[in-house]
Each structure stands twice: as structure tokens, then as C-alpha cells.
Amino acid sequence: MKRTGMMVRIGLSAKSRLAVIVWREVLDALRDRRTLITAAILPMLLIPVSINLPMFFISPRRNPPDIGVLQLDAGAGGFAALMKGMEELRVTDLDQGQNLTRLVETNEYDVVVVIPSNFTELIRDERKAVIQIIYDGSNPRSSTGVNLIQGLERAYAQRIVEERMKERKIDPELLHPIEVNTLNVKGISQAQATVGMLIPYFIGLLSVLAGASFASDTTAGEKERKTLEAFLTMPVTRLQILLGKYLGVVILSLIGVFFQLVGMSVGMSVYLTLFSELLGETAQPLHIDFTNFSVIALFSLILSMTGNAILMTVCTFAKSFKEAQQYTSALITGFIIPMMLIMYLPPALMSRMLLLPVLGPLIMIRNAVFNIYTPTQTLLCLLSSIVYLSVLLFVAHKTFSSDKILFKV
């Protein structure tokens, strides 16, 4: 075989043999155009869209709710003017005789507001005026429109109360005997906090997903194509073959993670803007300095290496690429659980989980985003992760060295 001859020509250098195996795995994958599309182009295009498309549809500034207003009181122009002056609402006047409920049911309007004919009279007589709001609870834009209109109603009612108190020469401050003064000890906005929660989830998921297909192909795929047997006849040990394949998968996985992180960075920057608009905050970037970025990169590498070691070990048991895909799908589902936990676990509990596999690196990534980790935590998590990885590679070696498992004999 050509590859066997290449192995013989390089002599007995273990490092050279290992490098050839790694290079062979990476090169074979990169020659396939599908690798370029799935690992580089699609992530950079689809991730920003998938992150921000839902936010675009519920952002009132980018996609304002359509509000239909039936004003039965000509003197109630003040409240109607408030709605029309709000850029987060797209307001249209309605005529009497229209089926208002039907207009909302058919999604011609997200919300219909009815201002009664006695609106001004009731307010003038210092009685309660009722505004009717018709909306569709299954429509996110409809719910957003209701929230915005209710906010306007509270502001309009507050203005009426203050005018009444001034007429009676009463200080409006009497309505606010208590004031809440908040102090954010981390100095992080709600939008930034949400992005900080999402980053560990996406990095963890991408670190595992990026290598799943490569891990399946280099083990079960080669068994199915009958190329693994020829590989084993070369003058290399099974440990060298395993490490070469494993490092090749890790490199390919990291290439995929890199492009996915590029897409995620673009997506998150847009997400911050959209989420800030939804909350009425000023969009602020999430700054991550070089040290924190290095910590994130280190534990992303560990996550990728750990996930790929598990995937390759399990895929070794598969007889075919299709069977391996079933195994990897089940494993990825299992990986999603700790990744989602990171988004909701209380910080006090996270500090006790730093020594756990997968969870520990995810917690360190989350803490690095917010710059709340210590060197001791970093060292302990790193050492425990190396121990877990060493155990996984030992198990993978034992599995790969067994003909009974490798070839089902």
C-alpha cells in the first residue's frame, strides 16, 4: 500500500509515525468539501441567524407590534398620541363596525385597543376609566404589544394623578414614600448577564458537536470501509494509531470550534443590542480581556479533548458509521444536561462542582466571562480535568487494543 510504504520510509521514529497519522486524519477530512461547509461556512452563517432570529421577531424596535386603535372618545387624544409617538408600536386608527376580535384572530393586528366614549368624562369626574385590550396570547408580538401599552397606561395614569395633586397643592412626592437604590456589585447589565450565561452553553455544545462526525468516521467509518485493518498492518503500535486518530479529531474539532466561535461572537454582539432594546437598556459590549480569554480557550480545549475521548471510545464499539451516529446522538443529548445546568445553577453551588468532569470546565468558562475566578480554582479544575482525561484515554486505549471489541470477534 502507498501509505504503508510512506510509513516504512520514515524509519522507526515514533514521533514521526504519530505525526503522519495525525496529518493523514486531518488531511483526509479537509479534502472533503463537506468538512469545509459543515465546519466553517455553515457555523459562521447559521449561528448568528439562529441566535438572533427569535430576538428579532420579539424586538419591538426591529419588528414593532401592529396596534389597532378604536377611539370612541374624541377627547381622549392624549393617550392615543402616546401610543402613536412610541417608535416600538405601529399604530393604526380603526373604524366602528369592524369585528375587533376577528382582526386579532386573523393576525391582521397584534393588539386592538378600544378607548370608550366616556373615557374623558370618567377621568374628569375622577372616576376610573377602563381601556379594553384585545390580544392573542399565542402571539409573542401580541404579548409584547400588551406589555408596552400597559406601560404607557401606567405612565399616563401617573401623569393624571400628579396633575390632580398639583391642583390640590399636594406634593406628588407623597406618592413615593420609599425609593429603592440598587447597587450592582458586578457592574453587569441584564443583557450582558444573559449573554454570559449563553456563552458556556454554546462553547460546551460546540466543543462536543464539532468532533462528533469525525470521531464516528475515524473509528466506525473506517471499520465499515475496511481501511482500519490495513492501518493496523503498518509498523506502528495501536497506541500510536489511537493517539494519531484522537489528535486528528481534536484538531479538526478545534478548527470547527474556531469558526463556530466566530459565528457566535458575531451573533452575540447583535444579540446584546436586540436584548438591550427589549429591556429598554443601552446596549453595552461584553468585554473579555486576554487573561480571561486564555482561560476560556484553555478549558474549551479540555472540553473538546474530553468529549472527543468519550466519543471515540464509544464509537469503537459500533459496527457501522450509522450505528456510531446513533451512539453519538445519545451522548450529545447527555452532554446537553450539564451544559444547560450551568445556565441556572446558583453560584454558591457552582463553586462545589469545579472538580467534576465537564461541569468543572464549563463553570470555569462561565467564571472567566465574568472575571470571578481565582488562580487556585483554575489550578484545581485543570488538574482534575487532566486526571479525568488520562483515565478516558486509558480506557480508549484498552478498548482500541481489544480485537474482540474492535472487530466484534
Image (spheres, rainbow, N blue to C red):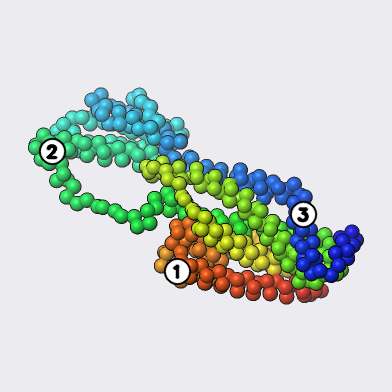
Give the vertical position of 232 relative to 163 (above or below): below
Which residue is drawn at the image coordinates 76% and 49% (left, top)? Answer: 32
Q: Residues within 10 Å of mark 1 (few under 14, many from 20)?
A: some
Q: Residues within 10 Å of mark 3 (few under 14, many from 20)?
A: few
Circles 2 and 1, Cβ within 8 Å, touching? The answer is no
Residue 351: image tag: 1
Which of 39/158 is in front? Answer: 39
| Residue 22 seen from this side | yes
How many dots with numbers?
Answer: 3
In the picture, measured across the screen, residue 394 lies left or right of residue 86, that is right
* Residue placed under numbered mark 2 in the picture: 165
Dot 1 amino acid type: Ser
| Label 3 to label 1: alpha-carbon separation | 41 Å
In the picture, measured across the screen, residue 160 lies left or right of residue 251, that is left
Circles 2 and 3, Cβ within 8 Å, touching? The answer is no
Where residue 223 appears, as percent x and y from the top left, is 80, 63
Which image quadrant for residue 109?
Answer: top left
* Residue placed under numbered mark 3 in the picture: 27
Q: N-terminal of the two: label 3 or label 1?
A: 3
Which residue is drawn at the image coordinates 60% and 55% (left, top)? Answer: 206
Dot 3 amino acid type: Leu
Which of 289/216 is in front? Answer: 289
Q: Residues within 10 Å of mark 2 (few under 14, many from 20)?
A: some
Which residue is drawn at the image coordinates 16% and 44% (left, top)? Answer: 173
Q: Residue furthest left?
A: 169
| Residue 332 seen from this side | no
Where residue 152 appears, as percent x and y from the top left, is 30, 37
Residue 300: image tag: none
In the picture, measured across the screen, residue 267 lies left or right of residue 153, that is right
